[in-house]
Image (spheres, rainbow, N blue to C red):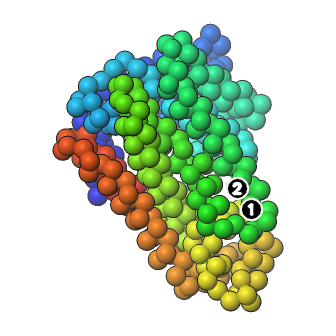
Amino acid sequence: MKTVEQIKLPILKEMEFFETKFKASMISNVSLLNRITHYIVRRKGKQMRPMFVFLVAKMVSNGQFKERTYRGASIIELIHTATLVHDDVVDDSNTRRGFFSLNALWKNKIAVLVGDYLLSKGLLLSIDNDDFDILKHISIAVREMSEGELLQIEKARQLNITEDVYFEIIRKKTATLIAACTAIGATSVDAPKSEVEKMRKFGELIGIAFQIKDDLFDYSEEKIGKPTGIDIKEQKMTLPLIYTLNHCSRKERKWLINSVKNHNKDKNRVKEVIEFVKQNGGIEYTIDKMKEYQHLAVEILNDYPDSSYKESLMTMVNYVIEREK
């Protein structure tokens, strides 16, 4: 499997230039804020989202690029970082990508304020440059991410989630931000509305496949950065579990629901649930669904002429479902 660095090759110069612009977009007059944002920048992840913006922009415009493509990528990264900071507060998480989270180092009050600051910087970057079309994409994404998280919390209490509701949750919670990346990539180079929508759908399909892959990690025995069974412990209804609940006897269903609801802290019981899901086809079904979304994403890319940007996007689609963490 190709590495992220190999996928990045056709846009390497743009990504390097983006680093400088992204750092500049965070600068404040408050020294505490600058210390914190410096900490954030030094511990950045793979930067998949800006890569989606750049690769889509280049693919749909035959290699053209605009200043607002950089702004679009910066806005996405600012908003994404803000949501991660807020998520760590909500989840009471002390680590992020193997490092201390902001709330662990500077406490919740400062972390929430930093998240708000990053969010406002992203919005102002759009407004100050009259990028209202880009602002609309990102505003929809923020709204849907909030709705998705709240819908998941609501349904986790009831444990009666259907497959349709599950897909609505992950579409909003995870896929909507990747859809915003790909839509913004096309928008930033003035692609027609029909093409922007096509690219938005492409991002949504990848985002759904990405989240399904995350669900599968809960049933993996590999070391992947989060403990096996963590979703069960947190009463998150993932696709392997939903499928199994809908394809077992009433007695087994009762045992499964009781296990997730009342025994999710019992390591042995969680292991039994994982084994039961594996034996009853939950994993195979989930893998098939993930590949279905991957195939639909590839079909959209097939409409475009061959280029290094299209090839990298194809590799990204495969990377999403083949990654090991």
Check disc 2 and report the residue beneath it. Answer: 152
**310 up-or-down from 126: above or below:** below
Q: Residues within 10 Å of mark 2 (few under 14, many from 20)?
A: many
* Residue 307 on image: x %, y %: 19, 41
Depth check: give the residue in front, 21 or 93: 21
Q: Which residue: 79% across, 62% down?
A: 157
What residue is rendered at 24% in x and 44% in y? 304
Eyeballing the image, is 104 above or below 250?
Answer: above
Percent x, y of residue 193: 41, 32
Q: 250 or 218: nearer the eye?
A: 250
Mark-to-mark CA distance, 1 and 2: 6 Å
In the visual, does 25 lie left or right of 102?
Answer: left
Residue 322 circle label:
none
Q: Which of the 4 quarters of the picture holds residue 32?
A: top right
Q: Secondary structure at mark 1?
A: helix
Q: Which residue is mark 1?
A: 156
Mark 2 belongs to which amino acid?
A: Gln
In percent of the image, x 63 and y 54: which residue is there? 169
Direction from residue 294 to residue 64 in the image, left or right = left
Say if mark 1 contacts mark 2, CB within 8 Å: yes
